[in-house]
Amino acid sequence: MSGAGTELLAKARRFREVDVIQHESVPNVPEMLEKICNFLQKHETPSPQDCTHTVFDNFPDWWQPQKSSFKLAVAEDNTLELLYGFISNCYDLGIPLTLTEKRTPQIRFIQDIEIWGTQNATLTAEDLLRPETKFARILGKTMGEIYPNRDFLDAVVFDSSGKSMTKGVMKTSLRLVWSSIIVDKERAARIRDFVVHKFKDCKDEEITALENKMQEDSKANEWASVFSDAVYFGRFGIRMPLNDRTSPAPLKKPENRPLNPHGVLRFTFAEGSLADVEQIAQKQDLDGTEWLKIGCVRQDAGSPLTEWVEPKWRGERAPRPAAQSHQGGGGGGGGG
């Protein structure tokens, strides 16, 4: 057992305030922590131009040198694969990293769903996204209107629901990554606005009951904040799957709410209408690296945007300025 690895283990316990760091998939924890530390430090960069990933809100973690840039440059496929493996190791060990992706001009389309609960309870991923729920079906139907020439669309679901340290109440925090849809931030914001319009306009009893329940729990639960736009415009990068977020200063601690894999939903279309919703994968069906591959959003520069039918609706507002964020209640893109 190397001295450096043993010191890192002690440091990780101290920084993360845990007594035990272990998992059956990692037989030699000190050695693994040393590998992870060396890899991350080797890929630190001072250059904003070279940066591909950042540390959420510049959180000083166990692996960092005394003077850290909080920026990483990890671009090549084989290096990215190593990063995914190390992220997965830390997740399994119960000390998830706090890394975000730097937005590229084109990204996979993602939706962050954020709902405030009470001190003891909040809506679950199952409540909202079981294949038979109206919430899931309206979401799928709306996406099908924007992308009408598809036989199916898959949404990769991550769940970081739990106790919010900032407000001291439970919070539903879900992320959907539409893995085959490539957008820019203006297009992402327009889709998000259309989805908000569809839910506001919906008169279905199940959706009305859901809206009433959300409002009982918190008056902040308006559809425009439930579908957060901070992920497109916020000051932080886009939090990576299996990674944690940190609470704002002065707490500045990991919230122990990593983006956990929940499953993959498939929305199938026939003759221009939503025909079926099914869950085609659950958490245990894929390993951590595979969840990262289908859940990360960066795209190569110049990637073509997925062909769409631009949504238009009565009463729509004028397009927002590109840098504007107005409903970013969830941590500036880190995924609340």
Image (cartoon, rainbow, N blue to C red):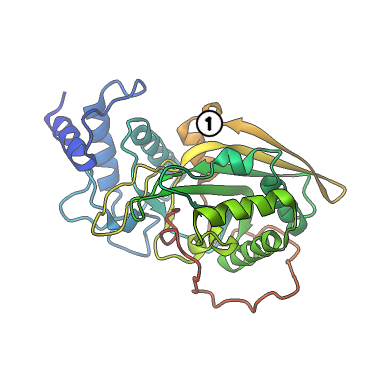
Q: Element under label 1?
A: helix
Residue sitting nearer the eye, 276 or 104: 276
Left or right for 281, reference 25: right
Picture quadrant of residue 309? bottom right
What residue is shown with label 1? Answer: 283
**Position of 227 relative to 117 (above/below):** below
Residue at the (70%, 48%) spot, across then down: 206
* Residue 85 point in image, percent of width and height: 40, 35
* Residue 263 point in image, percent of width and height: 57, 36
Q: Quadrant of the N terminus?
A: top left
Residue sitting nearer the eye, 3 or 278: 278
Residue sitting nearer the eye, 235 or 149: 235
Furthest residue in direction front, as rendered:
216
Left or right for 59, reference 112: left
Residue at the (61%, 38%) spot, across then down: 264
Task: Identify which amino acid the numbered label 1 is placed on.
Answer: Lys
